[in-house]
Image: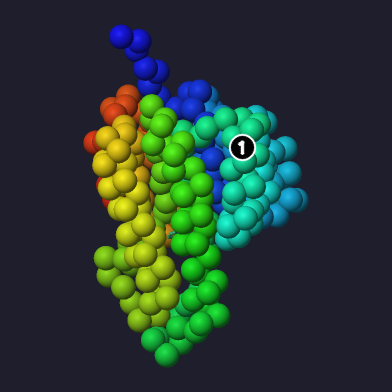
């Protein structure tokens, strides 16, 4: 029997929302560990800057909240690079405050873009993850899902929906008996935890996690 490679080296990982602080830190760590990284953002200038900052990263511009844009992105990736082994979803943003009465539709629509992007990206690359010998998808949720506040009701509701979607992906992987894992990281604040997030992402492919079934469906709290 041929031995499967372990670790992240040689894997192809797509970072959805890669141009922020956390995305750049994750991209740098994945490239340093030998992964092929596809970094996606909606702004050409920020994607170009990321490619210049981290040699080896392949930048892609797409509006991940637009279903057609995501399908075109998947076609470009499949034609130019091939199937992906991992998706790290980092599209986010925060708006809130003002108690329940202050949970405006405008803020909700802004926040829901993160969930919309998760749905589009995970559906477009789902078959890749099932077929990969080490498929992984991860997102960053919030500790408020366990203890919601009135002022963060919109935000936490969107994160809870995203966590539910991740559990559905996990059930799909399990049903397909794929060695894949859908993992939710929870943080209170990412500020200062970017390196921990990056290490945790690289560790999704560690030798201990070689068979993703053990990680699949897990919620991992990241604390300083
Ligand atoms: N920051 C925190 O304290 C915190 C706490 C809990 C959870 N989280 C979660 O952790 C994740 C990362 O957080 P962050 O603060 O690093 O996020 P961020 O700085 O807001 O970065 C989000 C990334 O998504 C990209 N993006 C936004 N809209 C997009 C679109 N329509 N299409 C493609 N790319 C898009 C942004 O780049 P462009 O604008 O250039 O497209 C950026 O690269 C998010 O899911 C967030 O909700 C963060």
Q: Quadrant of residue 43?
A: bottom right
Q: Position of residue 76 (x, y in %)?
A: 65, 39
> Quadrant location of the N terminus?
top left
In the displayed structure, would residue 218 be above or below residue 37?
Answer: below
In the displayed structure, would residue 54 be above or below residue 187?
Answer: above
Q: How many marks?
A: 1
Left or right relative to 1: residue 39: right
Identify the residue at the far left of this view: 214
Q: Position of residue 45 (x, y in %)?
A: 75, 51
Left or right relative to 140: residue 12: right
Residue in front for this viewpoint, 210 or 81:
81
Asked whether residue 18 is in view, the answer is: yes
Which residue is located at x 44 percent, y 27 percent?
8
Asked whether residue 215 is in view, the answer is: no
Q: Quadrant of residue 186?
A: bottom left
Q: Position of residue 42 (x, y in %)?
A: 66, 55
Q: Position of residue 47 (x, y in %)?
A: 69, 46
Identify the residue at the far bottom of this view: 101
Residue in front for this viewpoint, 148 or 15:
15
Which residue is located at x 59 percent, y 51 percent?
70
Dot 1 falls on a residue whose secondary structure is: helix
Which residue is located at x 49 percent, y 84 percent?
104
Residue named by callout 1: 77
Residue in front for this viewpoint, 16 or 144:
16
Which residue is located at x 41 percent, y 32 percent?
131
Quadrant of the picture in which ligand 1 is shown: bottom right
Q: Residues within 10 Å of mark 1 (few under 14, many from 20)?
A: some
Q: What is the basis of the colouring in this image? A: rainbow
């Amino acid at each position: 029997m041929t031995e499967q490679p372990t670790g992240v080296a040689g894997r192809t990982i797509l970072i959805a929302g890669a141009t922020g602080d956390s995305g750049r830190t994750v991209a740098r760590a994945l490239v340093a560990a030998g992964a092929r990284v596809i970094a996606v953002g909606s702004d050409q200038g920020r994607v170009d800057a990321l490619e210049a900052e981290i040699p080896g990263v392949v930048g892609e511009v797409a509006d991940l909240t637009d279903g057609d844009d995501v399908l075109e992105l998947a076609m470009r990736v499949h034609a130019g690079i091939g199937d992906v082994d991992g998706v790290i979803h980092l599209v986010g943003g925060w708006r809130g405050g003002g108690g329940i009465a202050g949970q405006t539709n405008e803020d909700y629509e802004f926040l829901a873009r993160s969930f919309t992007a998760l749905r589009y990206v995970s559906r477009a690359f789902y078959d890749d993850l099932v077929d990969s010998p080490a498929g992984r998808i991860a997102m960053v949720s919030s500790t408020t899902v366990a203890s919601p506040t009135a002022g963060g009701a919109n935000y936490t509701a969107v994160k809870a929906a995203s966590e539910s979607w991740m559990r559905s992906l996990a059930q799909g992987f399990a049903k397909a008996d794929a060695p894949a894992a859908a993992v939710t990281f929870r943080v209170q604040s990412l500020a200062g935890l970017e390196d921990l997030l990056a290490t945790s992402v690289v560790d999704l492919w560690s030798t201990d996690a070689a068979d993703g079934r053990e990680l699949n469906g897990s919620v991992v709290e990241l604390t300083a």
